[in-house]
Image: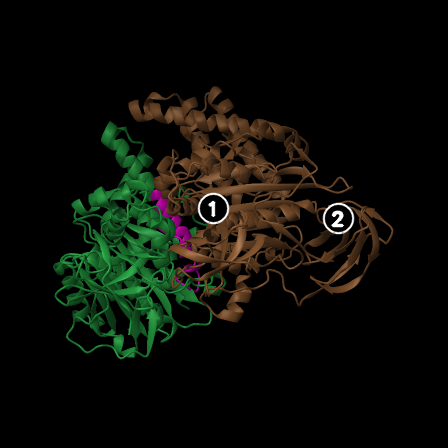
Amino acid sequence: MHKEYLTVSNIVGPLVIVEKIADVKYNELVEIEDSRGHLRRGTVLEVSTDQAVVQVFEGTVGLDIDKSRVRFLGRSQQLPVSEEIIGRVFDGSGRPRDNGPQIIARKRLDINGSPINPDARDYPSEFIQTGISSIDGMNPLVRGQKLPIFSGSGLPHPRIAAQIARQARVLGKEEKFAVVFAAMGITFEEANFFIEDFRNTGALERAVLFLNLANEPAIERIATPRLALTCAEYLAFELDMHVLVILVDMTFYAEALREISAARKEIPGRRGYPGYLYTDLATMYERAGRIKGKKGSITMIPILTMPEDDKTHPIPDLTGYITEGQVILSRELHRKGIYPPIDVLPSLSRLKDKGIGAGKTREDHADVLNQLFACYARGKEARELALILGEAALSDLDRLYLKFADLFETEFVRQGEFEARTIEETIELGWKLMRQLPKKELKRIRPEYLEKYYSPAAAAGGEKANEA
Amino acid sequence: MRQGKIIRVAGPLVVAAECLGAKMYDMVRVGHLGLIGEIIELNNDQAYIQVYEDTTGVGPGEPVVLTEKPLSVELGPGILGSIYDGIQRPLDVIRARHGEFVSRGIEVPALDRERRWTFEPIKKAGDRILAGDIIGYVQETPLIQHRIMVPENGDGEIIEIKEGEFKVSEVVCRIKKESGEIKELNLFQVWPVRKQRPVKERLMPFEPLITGQRILDTLFPLAKGGTACVPGPFGSGKTVVQHQLAKWSDAQIIVYVACGERGNEVADLLLSFPELKDPNTGRPLLERTVIIANTSNMPVAAREASIYTGMTIAEYFRDMGYSVALMADSSSRWAEALREIGGRMEEMPGDEGYPAYLASRLAEFYERAGKVICPGSEERIGALSVIGAVSPPGGDLSDPVVQATLKVVKVFWALDDRLANMRHFPAINWLQSYSLYRDSLKKYFAEKVAEDFVELSQEAMKLLELEAELQEIARLIGLESLSFKERLVLETARSIREDFLHQNAFHPQDTYTSMRKQYLMLRTILHFHHRANEALEAGKEFSDIVSLEVRDRISKMKYLPEEEEALLQVEKEVDASFKAL
């Protein structure tokens, strides 16, 4: 039996301060019983000889100083796991929310995990075909990568994330895979969109969901992604599954962290976010990856909404410094009615280089990708110039580039929500657009590939040779 | 050993009482788990300890064991090719013993105690020696000879020196000091990380660190023994620049500190270094490399220590007379670790919440670089170059870490978001970057590369600056308003950018360019420019000049192999095309 304390001295925001304690450990799990007998949970944020600062997940509404009973449980927060966890829906603290039974634990795992030894990491190099040209062609995703989507309010990031979850596959392989989905602070409607989509495509049977919705306690959000990642680690590294983790919305997570920091009166960093936001985010994002000698993998797609579409806001900024690239959505493309409105130029996949090329996608993929980037960038510059000076002021070449940029957006980037293009189709589409430009403009492409693919007939021949 | 008692735990900061007599920066073992920590503040009998491991489960009342030694590294054979965490624990050994995830309270010696090394003495009994003198060699890797040096306070006379196979901890030499005291030397020494290793004399740098990266070597060269910083927003290619330097620069030893960065980037280094060959010897690059990896999810206090661990190892190899390059990726993460610990100690914050001593700590760190005469009786020259990446929030160069760094470093490679978006790599902005070594390296370039090399690079810089001005005009009043000569400048500048400065790190030929080839490429581009100018003056059509086929040949020069003939051929073709015009 754990000792019970009635010595709460102070309640500030989500924090409770307990006095006259003994034998309390840092980061220990805490149970608080309020005067009506309701249980809440929390963790120890700071402890000294006679006092502990406890962060309460469910919030402090209705807690009082004299009747609250506090129990320290002598362990950190854990997630019970077993094979049965697949197909289940939990709340933000890991309790079943689908009216199903409690998970009978095969193991109890600390939700904070441990860092992967960098020496044990296997470099991600398996190309994942998402069927979306602006990702596969331009910013390819590989297994074990963490690639966030930087979105803005009102942009269709849920549809894109769902499309990726639906279409993602590794070429030529059928393997055990699962989706782990964590929702932090999103609305019921948004969460429901995902659940319905998973249900319609049959993905729900292979999914594990952790939902903390907008009307649920904000502080609970601190634990939600960690629960999801602990679950993902179990599935990937003990059950050999390939796991896709979707975390939405990291902005609400960071806001919850700021709330706690403010209540502790910590010295704030930029925009009031705590100075340790980088480290805190890293302890989650870095849990994605591959491990040498293990079959499974964790691929992560965190989604965040940039306040005022500002990429330099601390949340996207710090995320970008940790993750291996980013997919940025553009309001401008969205207004033009282009789906998916992926802003190709500032988007990036850092791990693409070992995941593409001969034997993985196609030999010319890297060059095509670089060339398309360069041409599209030049075309957008021409477009700006035309805005100021009028199209007539452009040189003939610039006009070609301008046309290229238009076609690139309407034919390459734009595609249907249920359209899954193969990587061959995507690369060929790229060539089709590049043929609009004179051959000698294509400086980023090696001469041998230019020879092989530039003229349409050669391309057809080349493709055959490739297939053979 | 003496013990204190924990009275407070707040994340990586632990406060212990009953620690009277403990010294600043002494190492301690914290709690029942024996976590490693370091004392960073003393207040009466209370010691403030930053703990290098996660403190979950540690609480008041637990013991703190004082080791009464400062945080130190072990310096001896076995360092090269290793991967260490921020406090020099070998991650490969930890993985073999404790599995894929890093657990806590692990104690592993940095150097393998069981491995035997062949020691070849070069001194003999009766020789008088000074601290810093080399007493013998161990061939640590086929690439690098590890020179065993006399440690500090080792002046005296050799009374015995052995030859043969030894473990690092075995005695190989005995010295009789002036005082009559006998000192025994084994193959390794221990040195506190926060203390700079002594040098005999500091020299001015005069030799470039050749990197094979065209924009760096030709426009913004770094000297051996110099300091550089690479600031840029995320996605602008800081890490690729650092990796390229680690792979291709002509330093003899590379110390790569991955400080608070991505685990997969470390995996990439570990994967590619054994395969990459040293251009001069054909041996795997890992044989000259040490990696310190304290990734972003590893404990924050160890991140703070990691750059000092790397620096001390780098200094040790410099003392042997090697040219060493240290890459720190990224110093911003180190500064954030300082801020986090400072915040928990409730220090008064300076700019952006960083502690007030940020600038002085950074300056201290970079000042450990340099070209020096090493201690000892021989006049050995060693060089330690430091290249620090900085990750300012939002790429904003007014960030305190960037500003504090710029005050001390001599070379500034500014990464540019806009270039990165156009996939122009390396995305180093040629208008913002600078190198203060251009003058001191002039002589070297003129003698070792070509008489007119510096002139050519200055001309290229001028054209790029002119391009920026002309583009401004063209944007306002249209391209037509420019004269053909001015439009030629635009064409040539574009050629410099796309055919010369743009370099593909992932293309087998393009990834490294020798100084000779860099020179010939630039000379050919500018030769075309001069000939085109003459042709314009002779009344030839602008459109004919810019559509000459030979321009395509120039643009492909980067893919040509390093053969003098083939490269000179392009220049001849330029002449031929203008003749035919």
From the image, which quarter does the N terminus of chain B lie in? bottom right
| Residue B44: assigned label | 1
Residue B314: % across, % down: 61, 47
- Asked if badge 1 and badge 2 are on a common chain, one would say yes
Figure colour of chain B = brown
Q: Secondary structure at mark 1?
A: loop
Horizontal and vertical percent position of residue A287? 37, 62
Residue A9 appears in view = yes
* Amino acid at dot 2: Gly
A370 inside magenta stretch? yes
The Cα atoms of the two marked residues, 1 and 2, are separated by 37 Å
In the image, taking residue B2 as reference, residue A397 lies left or right, namely left
Q: Colour of chain A?
A: green
Residue A460 spot, x, y in % from top left: 36, 60
**Magenta segment boundaries in residue numbering:** A348-375
Q: Report the front residue among A236 and B517.
A: A236
Query: Chain letter of disc 2?
Result: B
Q: Is residue B496 visible?
A: no
Report whether A160 appears left or right of B486: left
Which residue is more in the foreground, B465 or B441? B441
Q: Which residue in the structure is indicated by mark 2? A: B154
